[in-house]
Amino acid sequence: MRYELKPEYDRFVALAGIADNMLDHDSGRNLVMHCSVVFRVFIDGQLAAESPVMRISQEPWRFDVKISPGSRFINLVCMDAGSRSLLDQGNWVEAGFMLKNPSTTCRVRPLPYFARGKSVRSDSAGSARSAYQ
């Protein structure tokens, strides 16, 4: 997912982890045990932060990434970590931007089109939206 950065953004914050919903399905329980992903944050094409290899039922990884002045874009990436499982489904949750001005009422600005606690996918036009729409 790619988002344009605004000058008032100071930090990107989020939790990231593997979706546990497949554990509820008998057919997926054995397959999902082998899921592994790595979450990466790129700012203007440069790697800014990376999670360790994440597996099913692990605590989410916490991201708190400083955004340099003049940065234009942030990309959120969820990549296979070697398992090659089709069930490598990662979630970015509670994601947003901390604002530079501490006197602003809302210090965390949520990502556009982000559905809290739901998987997000990109359509053919590249815009992110909830998988449950």
Image: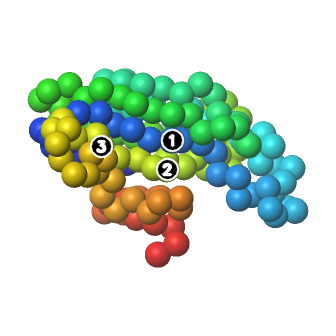
Residue 79: x and y in percent read: 54, 37
Q: Position of residue 15 (x, y in %)?
A: 51, 41
Q: Label for residue 97? A: 3
Q: Nearer the viewer, residue 23 or 127?
A: 23
How crowded pointer 2 is (Cα within 10 Å; few <14, some 14-19, many 20+) is rated as many
Q: Nearer the viewer, residue 16 or 81?
A: 16
- Residue 54 falls in image quadrant: top right
- Please rate how many residues cluster around mark 1, counting C-alpha atoms within 10 Å: few if below 14, some from 14 to 19, many from 20: some
Instruction: Say if mark 2 contacts mark 3, CB within 8 Å.
Output: no
The residue lying at 52 percent from left, 72 percent from top is: 132
Task: Name the mark on residue 15.
Answer: 1
The mark nearer the N terminus, 1 or 2, is: 1
Which residue does the image show at 42% across and 25% down from the upper left?
49
Mark 3 or 1, nearer chain start: 1
Q: Which residue is mark 2?
A: 93
Disc 3 and disc 1 in contact, CB within 8 angstroms: no
Asked if labels 2 and 1 touch by Cβ distance under 8 angstroms, the answer is yes
Q: How is the image coloured?
A: rainbow
Up-down relation of residue 68 to residue 114 (above or below): above
The reply, left or right, for residue 118 in relation to residue 3 is: right
Left or right of 108 in this view: 117 = right
Q: Secondary structure at mark 3?
A: strand
> Percent x, y for residue 71?
17, 31
- Residue 2 visible from this viewpoint: no
Tell me the element at label 1.
strand
Measure how far apart labels 1 and 2 are at the Cα level.
5 Å
What amino acid does circle 1 point to? Leu
Is the residue marked by circle 3 packed among few (<14), some (14-19), or many (20+) residues within 10 Å? many
**Whole-Å distance between the Cαs marked 3 and 1?**
12 Å
Q: What kind of element bears circle 2?
A: strand
Q: Is residue 71 visible?
A: yes
